[in-house]
Image: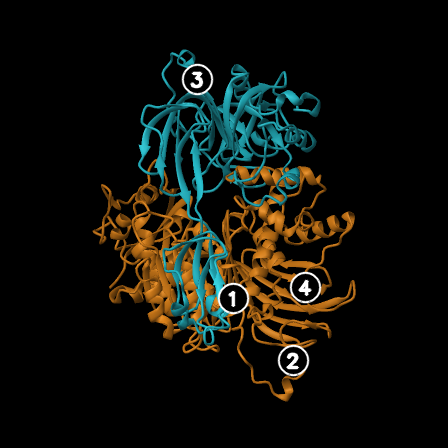
Chain colours: A orange, B cyan
Amino acid sequence: MELRSILATDCGSTTTKAILIQKIDGEYRLTHRGEAPTTVEAPFEDVTRGVLNAVMEIEELAGRKILEGDDIMSPQNGDEGVDIYISTSSAGGGLQMMVAGVVKSMSGESAERAALGAGSIVMDVMASNDGRLPHEKIKRIRDLRPDMILLSGGIDGGTVSHVVELAEILHAANPQPRLGQNYKLPVIYAGNKNAQDQIRDTLGDMVDLDITENIRPVLERENLEPSRDKIHDLFMEHVMQQAPGYKKLMSWTDAPIMPTPGAVGSLIEMIAKKENITVVGVDIGGATTDIFSVFQGKFNRTVSANLGMSYSICNVLAESGLDNVLRWVPFDIDRKELTNRIGNKMIRPTTVPQSLEELFIEQAIAREALRLSFIQHKEFATSLKGVQKVRTISDAFDQSSSGESLVNMMDLDLLVGSGGVLSHAPRREQSARMLIDSFMPEGITQLAVDSIFMMPQLGVLANIEKEDLAEEARKAALEVFHKDCLIRLGACITPVGKAKEGAIILTAEFSMPDGSTVKHELKKDELFRIEAPYEPIQAKLTPDKKMDIGAGKGESIETTVYGGVVGLILDGRDRPITIPTDSESRLSSLKAWSEAVNEYPTRN
Amino acid sequence: MAHAYTPGLKVLHHAKVTKNRRLPIKGQVTKRVGDQLEPNDIVATTDLPGNVQMVKVANLLNIGPNDVLDVMLVSEGDTVTKGQMIAQTEGFFGYFKLDVKSPIDGTVESISGVTGKITMRDAPVPVEVDAYMTGTVKEIIPEEGVIIEANAAFIQGIFGIGGESRGDMEILVTDREHELTGDLLNESHRGKIVVGGSFISLETYKKALSLGVAGVVVGGFNYYDLEEILGYTLGVAITGSEDLVTSLVLTEGYGNIRMGSRTFDLLKEHDGKFVSINGATQIRAGVIRPEIVIPLKESEIPKTPVHQSEEKGIGKGSLVRIIRAPYFGRMGEVISLPPKLQQMESETMVRVAEVKIDEEILVIPRANLEMVETD
């Protein structure tokens, strides 16, 4: 079926964002967007109010009638209404889950991966071997009041008693759902299939038990898909039914409502697969930072629940330490003064940086929030733990074992940033610098930002399953993603290795689209920018004999790179980036790096 | 008229303050609609289920899990006392019997033939909920608690620590710009709520703690020093469960910031009264701010109509406070709300307001303004 117009909303915890996509001259484009405060709390307590307000803003901007009273007009009739309406949601704190497994680093981790992949916040991972006493676990379950529990454990044919013991703990806790008192808590069992009967006996009456395939049928293989699907189903059937106004919202949409991060994740997964590339995506919000990655074809998502730019800004300070934030601040500031300023942002989270100094501080904290979130992601995105590897004599000196991180920065093709501090930075150069300084890409990496954070809406669009709509919807999602969603910043080119101070570490030669040739000899610790558009550029990169640009030490490569609104950034700094510790050299390095990319306006 | 929607803190001479006083689980409500309440009156009671303990009977008796049911001397639901024998093996011709004794006073909740463990629950813990403030029972929430209503002067702070507290209020400074210093505190302030001006230092707050002051209300405090009081770095602003003798309510924020004049004047008006305060703060969806509730007698209620809080935005003439550097803490009057986006020094494009402060006109992002809601 041809889609002429698509209306999509994302109901966030504070703002509901609506976008209108239209087919113009045969291609799908984002034409208008609107936003309004989310209305799940008193005095409105009806999410559809915020949706209507956001859509009304689009109506005004587009001069197009979409609403008929309190209904969305569908299908499109002439210039009125839209063909389909879809939505994602993270309102009311999103989907909050607790997961359980027998061994924390095996089935516990698989369960966590399934829950995170489905877009939920994992409040706790309970395991037989997590060191807590049963009564401590029971108290924890009661205090947390999750929306849903995923219980796993034991390979098929493995332990029964440990899994049943977890169920008994759950039974003793008699957990109550967070929203609404009158429904039973959904519990998904995805563990040893031989324990299903006992699990049913233990939990059957008390919770809404759903049994699905084992998440870890054998040690060597994860089977996350059935659990992820089950989580999505139950999210719609139970959790969303309890949230104010969602029943009505669900009756409006042409496809199931997805949890916001689940939609973003599936979009990133789809793009990585379709273009056969490795991707890291990040969404830095006020309270949390989500990171998504696809390496070796494996998708991973982590949520750093308390690393964000407003509500949890002080937690970034607590976790990284004041010195790590201060090292990025390009002026001297009293420590008490700085912490008071950051504290005041936490208690008044909606403020914006008016002065340049405030912007410096905010972007310094963003670097640390992103860096810490990525460390957590790298630790989580690993190959399966507990798997026996067959080792040959050639592996004898290789210390690698099961549970290695899948994230390899030299292999990374595309790094996408989104969230206020990255999407709305006054200069795109600032977004590029924040991404480079915190993720520290190696070799050649394309950088991009999500212009207005529409990945959630595009994610749910790409996931429509109705047969007559699926193909066209996916096409629309991809077209808009490339044309309107992504702002291409350019490429970061970083040789990696050891070099002496002042040494030339890379000789780069680019054949620019205008026919000219640009050559640069990159010195250690230097940052250099070449303005270049998002067009194919032939590059010859020759690293020093001790440096690697992707083909091995001293090996030069000839390849195609793309510029963007920032251009090509040659980064000669160490990995990890070292910043001088004495104040004078630190300030002079920060100034030089900023000036190299024209990051900030000149201060008076 | 153009309006901007920004958060506002309440500073009200008179408000109908309502409070839900609920038990964490169902229990008995001890008051009726219309009852007059004092802060310490108990309004509802219940028993919290005790902690759960698991006893590994199969392991202790060296038997298989499915044999556990055969050796139990008690059944599910039985009440047992500490030391009471709850399971025993048959032994060998009546000899070498092994047994298990109850580790607690409580009840047997479940016996599992799969894991060989039994679940036991401690005796219940009694829980009571008090009225917190002077007022009248307006509504009963069956089996859970009551809704109390009071005529009161009501002030919201921006951040606090420590939970509910109450006591006679005493203003210790002459004006709102004065810091609450250590020399102003003495033994006579035990159990009282003291009010300072712009700031309290860590040393002075520690003195208040040692004197047993019930609460402190001031303009600001150093974020840096919270760690020493709490024992951890405060990462997210969710407070209220700290075990502190002295609750702390900040009316302005972190740093040395003079208290808003309306807040200070209102507190001063009620100097010497018995007040209730709560430092509990939650800054995320469903925000909770710290508060000061000053009950009013019938004769003290202003004759003018009761202020009904409504979601009104900032408009021309609104009294606002700037809530971010470089003008943090200053208050003034909005003189215009230009519709066009304007570029700030940081190059951020924002909607702005022109604010008149001490004869000077400043251009401030609207997001950095907080309306001071008054009546």
The mark found on residue A398 in the picture is 2
Judged by depth in the image, the label closer to the viewer, 2 or 1, is 1
Q: Are marks 2 and 4 in contact (CB under 8 Å)?
A: no
Amino acid type, label 4: Arg
Percent x, y for residue A431? 56, 52
Question: How many numbered tags mark residues here?
Answer: 4
> Is disc 3 surrounded by few (<14), some (14 to 19) or many (20+) residues within 10 Å?
many
Percent x, y for residue B364? 54, 31
The mark found on residue A575 in the picture is 4
Amino acid type, label 2: Asp
Judged by depth in the image, the label closer to the viewer, 1 or 4, is 1
* Residue found at the very far left of the displayed protein: A77
Alpha-carbon span between mark 1 and mark 4: 32 Å
Of residue B305 and residue A530, the one placed in the foreground of this image is B305
- Is residue B173 shown above or below B142? above
Label 2 residue SS: loop
Q: Chain of mark 3?
A: B
Residue pointed to by mark 3 = B296
Q: Earlier in the sequence, mark 2 or mark 4?
A: 2
Label 1 residue SS: helix
Q: Chain of mark 4?
A: A
> Is disc 4 surrounded by few (<14), some (14 to 19) or many (20+) residues within 10 Å?
some
The mark found on residue A392 in the picture is none
Alpha-carbon span between mark 1 and mark 3: 57 Å
> Is disc 2 surrounded by few (<14), some (14 to 19) or many (20+) residues within 10 Å?
few
Percent x, y for residue B328? 59, 31
Q: Earlier in the sequence, mark 1 or mark 4?
A: 1
Judged by depth in the image, the label closer to the viewer, 2 or 4, is 2
